[in-house]
């Protein structure tokens, strides 16, 4: 029994470490554009790669200088700094932009950009996933202790999610639904659990509505072969 417990602990640590390094899957770029941020010929904003201050700045400049304002931000991102994510999310919300997920929107991208969009579009092979916020257990402990950096993050998130009218639990709700069988399968696959996602109906329960598919359906399971995102329920 003791050996089994050690094995389960090993699997848990294997997944915990894996969650700290979310892989970025191959980017399908427009053949006419190699830059991370650009305005396409059909007047749509594209944002590729990790969320960054420089990419945000370029996005804002392209939008503000455009004679005809783009209505959609097409994004491919594995996330990034939480404050940069909220800055981009506020820009999306304030300008009532639609957001289309081009293959990947994870972590801060899912938390703050996807949730803030007027209309949300999912491509059939796209991955959308959450894996925490200032409400996750380890950060929440720091908030309770009054750690300045954690309290600052919490206050900013409270204001952000209140503004876009989304329940903050969407960022952490999946953790309680991880089962030992998920950890064991992850170990067998050699692919740690990256995070979790929801069905369209469950996302609506958190206040994230107006979600559409660019084709007939969202084939997230097929796309998930390159990551390990678990499907969970809202308020199980």
Image (cartoon, helix red, strand yellow):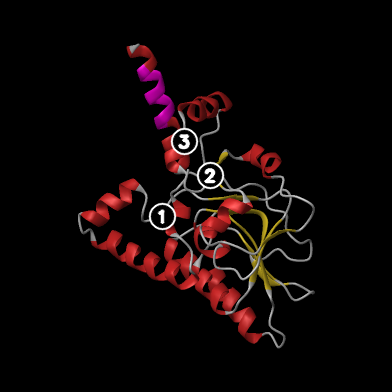
**Over which residues does the magenta segment extend?**
5-13
Q: Is residue 50 visible?
A: no
- Quadrant where the N terminus lies? top left
Residue at the outermost left position: 145
> Which one is earlier in the sequence, the residue at label 3 or at label 2?
3
Residue 36, position as x, y percentages in the image:
63, 64
Identify the secondary structure beneath mark 2: loop
Residue 144, position as x, y percentages in the image:
23, 55
Identify the secondary structure beneath mark 1: loop
Q: Residues within 10 Å of mark 1 (few under 14, many from 20)?
A: many
Along the line of sight, which residue is nearer the eye, 173 or 29?
A: 173
Q: Is residue 65 visible?
A: yes
Residue drawn at x 58%, y 62% as measured from the top left: 114
Above/below status of 3 relative to 92: above
The residue that disc 3 covers is 178
The residue that disc 1 covers is 133
The residue that disc 2 covers is 233
| Side of 126 where 91 appears, left or right | left
Along the line of sight, which residue is nearer the eye, 208 or 197?
A: 208
């Amino acid at each position: 029994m003791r050996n089994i417990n050690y094995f389960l602990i090993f699997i848990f640590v294997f997944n915990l470490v894996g969650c700290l390094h979310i892989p970025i899957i191959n980017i399908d770029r427009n053949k006419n554009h190699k830059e991370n941020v650009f305005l396409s010929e059909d007047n749509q904003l594209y944002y590729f790669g990790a969320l960054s201050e420089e990419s945000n700045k370029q996005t804002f400049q392209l939008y503000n200088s455009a004679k005809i304002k783009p209505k959609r931000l097409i994004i491919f991102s594995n996330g990034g700094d939480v404050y940069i994510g909220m800055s981009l999310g506020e820009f999306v919300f304030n300008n009532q932009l639609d957001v289309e997920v081009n293959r990947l929107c994870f972590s801060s991208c899912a938390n703050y950009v996807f949730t803030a969009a007027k209309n949300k579009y999912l491509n059939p092979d796209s991955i959308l996933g959450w894996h925490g916020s200032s409400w996750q257990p380890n950060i929440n402990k720091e908030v309770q202790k009054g750690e300045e950096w954690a309290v600052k993050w919490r206050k900013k998130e409270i204001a952000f999610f209140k503004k876009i009218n989304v329940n903050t639990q969407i960022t952490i709700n999946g953790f309680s639904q991880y089962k030992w069988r998920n950890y064991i399968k992850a170990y067998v696959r050699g692919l740690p659990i990256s995070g979790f996602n929801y069905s369209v109906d469950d996302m609506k329960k958190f206040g994230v509505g107006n979600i559409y598919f660019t084709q007939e359906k969202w084939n997230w399971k097929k796309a998930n072969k390159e990551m390990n995102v678990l499907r969970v329920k809202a308020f199980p």
